[in-house]
Amino acid sequence: KRLVCGREWCPICGKDDSEHHKRRIARLVDRVFSMDSVGYFVFEVPLAQRGYFEDVGMLRAASLYLGKMLKREGFSKAVRRWHFYGKAKVTEAKKLKLDKYHPHLNVLCDVTGRWADWDSCSDVGTGYIELELIKRIRGLWSAWLRENTDNVYRVAPVHYEFSDEPGQIWHWVRYITRSTFKALTDSNRHIASDLFQFNNVSWWGQMSN
Ligand SMILES: [Zn+2]
Protein backbone atom coordinates (compact mmCIF):
# COMPACT_ATOMS: atom_id res chain seq x y z
CA LYS A 1 0.00 0.00 0.00
CA ARG A 2 1.39 3.37 -0.96
CA LEU A 3 1.67 6.03 1.68
CA VAL A 4 -0.42 9.07 0.91
CA CYS A 5 -0.92 12.01 3.24
CA GLY A 6 -4.69 12.20 2.86
CA ARG A 7 -4.92 15.92 3.53
CA GLU A 8 -7.89 17.52 1.82
CA TRP A 9 -5.76 20.43 0.62
CA CYS A 10 -2.92 18.25 -0.71
CA PRO A 11 -2.57 18.89 -4.48
CA ILE A 12 -2.51 15.13 -5.04
CA CYS A 13 -4.77 13.64 -2.34
CA GLY A 14 -7.31 16.45 -2.60
CA LYS A 15 -8.13 15.78 -6.24
CA ASP A 16 -11.42 14.09 -7.08
CA ASP A 17 -10.85 10.37 -7.70
CA SER A 18 -7.36 10.49 -6.19
CA GLU A 19 -6.06 7.35 -4.58
CA HIS A 20 -7.06 8.73 -1.19
CA HIS A 21 -10.54 9.62 -2.38
CA LYS A 22 -10.94 6.05 -3.60
CA ARG A 23 -9.89 4.74 -0.19
CA ARG A 24 -12.50 6.91 1.48
CA ILE A 25 -15.13 5.54 -0.89
CA ALA A 26 -13.99 1.98 -0.21
CA ARG A 27 -14.35 2.47 3.54
CA LEU A 28 -17.98 3.53 3.22
CA VAL A 29 -19.34 1.63 0.29
CA ASP A 30 -20.24 -1.62 2.09
CA ARG A 31 -21.97 0.27 4.86
CA VAL A 32 -24.03 2.34 2.52
CA PHE A 33 -24.91 -0.57 0.23
CA SER A 34 -26.10 -2.56 3.26
CA MET A 35 -28.93 -0.02 3.54
CA ASP A 36 -32.30 -0.89 2.05
CA SER A 37 -32.87 2.54 0.65
CA VAL A 38 -30.89 5.66 1.26
CA GLY A 39 -31.91 9.08 2.50
CA TYR A 40 -29.39 11.86 1.94
CA PHE A 41 -29.53 14.76 4.41
CA VAL A 42 -27.42 17.88 4.18
CA PHE A 43 -27.31 20.04 7.32
CA GLU A 44 -26.19 23.59 6.71
CA VAL A 45 -25.27 26.35 9.15
CA PRO A 46 -26.70 29.87 8.73
CA LEU A 47 -24.06 32.40 7.65
CA ALA A 48 -24.11 34.28 10.96
CA GLN A 49 -23.26 31.09 12.90
CA ARG A 50 -20.57 29.66 10.64
CA GLY A 51 -17.72 31.32 12.49
CA TYR A 52 -18.35 29.00 15.45
CA PHE A 53 -17.62 26.08 13.16
CA GLU A 54 -14.04 27.14 12.55
CA ASP A 55 -13.46 25.21 15.75
CA VAL A 56 -13.14 21.47 15.31
CA GLY A 57 -14.78 20.87 18.71
CA MET A 58 -17.92 22.43 17.28
CA LEU A 59 -17.85 20.20 14.19
CA ARG A 60 -17.55 17.21 16.51
CA ALA A 61 -20.34 18.34 18.83
CA ALA A 62 -22.73 19.07 15.96
CA SER A 63 -22.02 15.74 14.32
CA LEU A 64 -22.63 13.91 17.62
CA TYR A 65 -25.86 15.78 18.20
CA LEU A 66 -27.18 15.14 14.69
CA GLY A 67 -26.33 11.45 15.02
CA LYS A 68 -28.18 11.13 18.32
CA MET A 69 -31.15 13.09 17.05
CA LEU A 70 -31.48 11.13 13.80
CA LYS A 71 -31.25 7.85 15.70
CA ARG A 72 -34.04 9.03 17.98
CA GLU A 73 -36.09 9.95 14.92
CA GLY A 74 -35.82 6.37 13.67
CA PHE A 75 -32.76 6.18 11.40
CA SER A 76 -30.99 3.09 12.69
CA LYS A 77 -27.85 3.34 10.58
CA ALA A 78 -26.00 6.07 8.76
CA VAL A 79 -22.65 7.43 7.64
CA ARG A 80 -21.73 11.10 7.85
CA ARG A 81 -19.00 13.42 6.65
CA TRP A 82 -18.43 17.17 6.71
CA HIS A 83 -17.87 19.28 3.64
CA PHE A 84 -16.13 22.56 4.38
CA TYR A 85 -16.86 24.47 1.20
CA GLY A 86 -19.33 24.40 -1.61
CA LYS A 87 -18.10 23.52 -5.06
CA ALA A 88 -14.64 24.99 -5.67
CA LYS A 89 -14.16 27.14 -8.76
CA VAL A 90 -11.11 27.34 -10.96
CA THR A 91 -10.38 30.97 -11.86
CA GLU A 92 -9.06 32.21 -15.19
CA ALA A 93 -5.52 32.07 -13.88
CA LYS A 94 -6.18 28.35 -13.29
CA LYS A 95 -5.88 28.90 -9.58
CA LEU A 96 -8.34 27.18 -7.36
CA LYS A 97 -10.57 29.70 -5.67
CA LEU A 98 -12.63 28.70 -2.67
CA ASP A 99 -15.83 30.43 -1.72
CA LYS A 100 -16.51 31.41 1.87
CA TYR A 101 -16.10 28.75 4.55
CA HIS A 102 -19.35 26.85 4.40
CA PRO A 103 -19.36 23.77 6.63
CA HIS A 104 -22.24 21.35 6.06
CA LEU A 105 -22.75 17.81 7.27
CA ASN A 106 -23.68 15.12 4.74
CA VAL A 107 -25.57 12.16 6.18
CA LEU A 108 -26.55 9.04 4.23
CA CYS A 109 -29.02 7.02 6.29
CA ASP A 110 -31.00 3.85 6.01
CA VAL A 111 -34.68 4.47 5.47
CA THR A 112 -36.57 1.36 6.45
CA GLY A 113 -38.79 0.02 9.23
CA ARG A 114 -41.57 2.52 9.80
CA TRP A 115 -41.04 3.96 6.31
CA ALA A 116 -41.47 0.60 4.59
CA ASP A 117 -43.55 0.61 1.45
CA TRP A 118 -46.51 -1.41 2.75
CA ASP A 119 -48.11 -1.59 -0.68
CA SER A 120 -45.32 -3.73 -2.03
CA CYS A 121 -44.37 -7.28 -1.17
CA SER A 122 -41.16 -6.48 0.72
CA ASP A 123 -40.77 -4.33 3.80
CA VAL A 124 -38.22 -2.17 2.02
CA GLY A 125 -38.96 1.52 1.68
CA THR A 126 -38.10 3.76 -1.23
CA GLY A 127 -36.41 6.38 0.93
CA TYR A 128 -39.47 8.56 1.12
CA ILE A 129 -40.11 10.22 4.49
CA GLU A 130 -42.82 12.69 5.50
CA LEU A 131 -42.26 16.39 4.90
CA GLU A 132 -43.43 16.98 8.48
CA LEU A 133 -40.49 14.94 9.75
CA ILE A 134 -38.00 16.91 7.64
CA LYS A 135 -39.42 20.13 9.08
CA ARG A 136 -39.22 18.74 12.60
CA ILE A 137 -35.58 17.73 12.07
CA ARG A 138 -34.83 21.19 10.68
CA GLY A 139 -36.42 22.75 13.76
CA LEU A 140 -34.35 20.59 16.11
CA TRP A 141 -31.12 21.43 14.26
CA SER A 142 -31.93 25.15 14.28
CA ALA A 143 -32.67 25.01 18.01
CA TRP A 144 -29.42 23.20 18.72
CA LEU A 145 -27.52 25.87 16.79
CA ARG A 146 -29.20 28.61 18.79
CA GLU A 147 -28.22 26.99 22.08
CA ASN A 148 -24.66 26.30 21.03
CA THR A 149 -23.78 29.51 19.21
CA ASP A 150 -25.08 33.06 19.62
CA ASN A 151 -28.46 32.36 21.22
CA VAL A 152 -30.36 33.64 18.18
CA TYR A 153 -32.87 31.37 16.45
CA ARG A 154 -32.35 31.14 12.70
CA VAL A 155 -33.82 28.54 10.39
CA ALA A 156 -30.92 26.34 9.32
CA PRO A 157 -31.24 24.90 5.80
CA VAL A 158 -31.74 21.13 5.73
CA HIS A 159 -31.95 19.31 2.39
CA TYR A 160 -33.27 15.81 1.86
CA GLU A 161 -33.21 13.49 -1.13
CA PHE A 162 -33.72 9.76 -1.29
CA SER A 163 -33.08 6.85 -3.61
CA ASP A 164 -33.00 3.09 -3.89
CA GLU A 165 -31.10 3.21 -7.21
CA PRO A 166 -27.56 1.79 -6.87
CA GLY A 167 -26.18 4.25 -9.43
CA GLN A 168 -27.52 7.25 -7.52
CA ILE A 169 -26.34 5.85 -4.19
CA TRP A 170 -22.87 5.25 -5.61
CA HIS A 171 -22.79 8.83 -6.87
CA TRP A 172 -23.63 10.11 -3.37
CA VAL A 173 -20.89 8.02 -1.74
CA ARG A 174 -18.37 9.41 -4.21
CA TYR A 175 -19.70 12.92 -3.73
CA ILE A 176 -19.72 13.06 0.07
CA THR A 177 -16.21 11.58 0.30
CA ARG A 178 -14.64 14.12 -2.05
CA SER A 179 -12.30 16.74 -0.70
CA THR A 180 -13.75 20.23 -0.38
CA PHE A 181 -10.99 21.94 1.63
CA LYS A 182 -8.94 22.14 -1.53
CA ALA A 183 -6.61 25.04 -0.85
CA LEU A 184 -4.88 26.66 2.10
CA THR A 185 -5.31 30.41 2.47
CA ASP A 186 -4.49 32.92 5.17
CA SER A 187 -8.11 32.82 6.27
CA ASN A 188 -8.46 29.07 6.61
CA ARG A 189 -5.02 27.93 7.72
CA HIS A 190 -6.04 27.93 11.40
CA ILE A 191 -8.93 25.56 10.63
CA ALA A 192 -6.68 23.27 8.62
CA SER A 193 -4.21 22.78 11.44
CA ASP A 194 -7.05 21.48 13.64
CA LEU A 195 -8.59 19.39 10.89
CA PHE A 196 -5.40 17.46 10.49
CA GLN A 197 -6.31 15.55 13.68
CA PHE A 198 -9.99 15.37 12.92
CA ASN A 199 -11.59 12.10 11.93
CA ASN A 200 -14.15 13.39 9.50
CA VAL A 201 -16.00 10.17 8.65
CA SER A 202 -18.17 8.44 11.22
CA TRP A 203 -21.15 6.09 11.26
CA TRP A 204 -23.64 4.33 13.48
CA GLY A 205 -25.69 1.14 13.26
CA GLN A 206 -25.02 -2.44 12.24
CA MET A 207 -23.63 -3.13 8.82
CA SER A 208 -25.41 -6.46 8.22
CA ASN A 209 -28.98 -6.49 6.97
ZN1 LIG B 1 -1.23 13.96 -0.14
Image (tube, grey):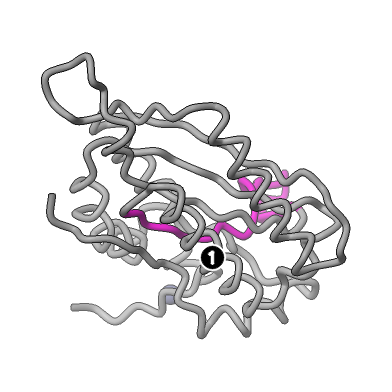
175 vs 8, left or right, is: left
Helix, strand or loop for disc 1? helix
Q: Residue at x 48, y 74 (%)?
A: 7
109 vs 30, left or right, is: right
Above or below, 3 against 166 in this view is: below
Quarter where residue 35 is shown:
top left
Q: Residue at x 75, y 69 (%)?
A: 148
Ligand 1 falls in which quarter? bottom left
141 vs 196, left or right, is: right
Above or below, 166 against 59 in this view is: above
Q: Residue at x 57, y 30 (%)?
A: 132
Q: Amino acid at mark 1?
A: Ser
The total of numbered circles placed on residues is 1
Quarter where residue 115 is shown:
top left
The residue closer to the viewer here, 126 or 184, is 126
Q: Residue at x 73, y 55 (%)?
A: 143
Residue 36, position as x, y percentages in the image: 22, 38
Q: Name the residue beneath numbered marker 1.
A: 63
The N terminus appears in which quarter of the rendering?
bottom left
Q: Residues within 10 Å of mark 1 (few under 14, many from 20)?
A: many
Above or below, 51 against 119 in this view is: below
The residue closer to the viewer here, 58 or 171, is 58
Quarter where residue 185 is shown:
bottom right
- The residue sitting at the top extreme is 119
Above or below, 2 against 139 in this view is: below
Residue 31, position as x, y percentages in the image: 23, 55
The magenta span reads: 77-99
Q: Is residue 96 magenta?
A: yes
